[in-house]
Amino acid sequence: MQHGDIWRGLDRLAEMHGLTVSGLAKLAGLDATAFNKSKRVSKDGRYRWPSTESIARALQAVEADFGDFAALVTGQYGQTIPILDLEQASLSGVFDGGGQPVLSEWEQVRFSRKIGHDWVFAIELTGTEGAPFYRSGDRIIVSAGAETRHGDRVLVKLSDGKLMVARLGRQTANRVELSDLSNGAASVFHESGQIAWIARILWVSQ
């Protein structure tokens, strides 16, 4: 990694989160000029490098990790995926029968990390769906192609069109156990015919 690559990584980190480098520095609790281009080379031409601490604080401020930063530095970063808010995604015609987005209905959003799964999309939550783990405005990253297991947090499309966020319980040939994410919530068994598809929630982005 060269001097310019490191600074370019910070530039990209700010850009991917809708910030200027000054905004990123302030969000990280640093001096607003810490990442400015004027600070990258001294008056006598010597290269100045950002400290490990300042990079770590910037990553923490936007909830990214060093893997994300390395991808930004090398240019192997980001992925554009389809997104809708929960209310829009509950309408008919936005998914096919297997839980994949019908792309003509969706907007696109770029994330600063590679998702690494097939058939990935994002849902921006509204209201209290997914509480207390998720809040209105959170974006859940979902894969209709990822294998699901007992205990996974999932997005479920019911045959009546409703979308719900739940914790997956036992699955048999005839029934699926789902429970609310709240602690102590009772499980509800759904007949297989009541469920159109189940997709695993991979992670959440604020």
Image (spheres, rainbow, N blue to C red):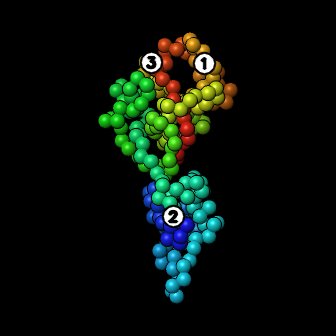
Residue named by callout 1 = 171
The x, y position of residue 116, in whole percent, is: 52, 42
Tell me where residue 86 appears, x and y as whole percent: 44, 34
x and y, in percent, of residue 46 in the image = 54, 83
Dot 3 amino acid type: Ser
Q: Nearer the viewer, residue 96 or 145?
A: 145
Could you give the CA–CA distance between mark 1 and mark 3, rounded to whole angstroms?
Answer: 17 Å
Q: Is residue 205 above or below residue 22?
A: above
Indicate the quadrant where residue 15 lies. bottom left
Q: Which residue is mark 3?
A: 159
Assess disc 3: are there few (<14), some (14-19) or many (≥20) residues with their C-alpha within 10 Å of its C-alpha: few
- Residue 3 against residue 193 in the figure, above or below: below
From this viewpoint, is residue 13 visible?
Answer: no
Assign a secondary structure to mark 1. Answer: strand
Q: How many marks?
A: 3
Q: What is the C-alpha distance between the residues marked 1 and 2?
A: 45 Å
User: Which residue, given by chain and number where applicable, does mark 2 sit on?
Assistant: 10
Q: Under tag 3, what secondary structure?
A: loop
x and y, in percent, of residue 200 in the image: 54, 32
Question: Residue flagged by tag 2: what amino acid is it?
Answer: Leu
Question: Which residue is the extreme one toward the right?
Answer: 184
Question: Of label 1 and label 3, which has the lower sequence position?
Answer: 3
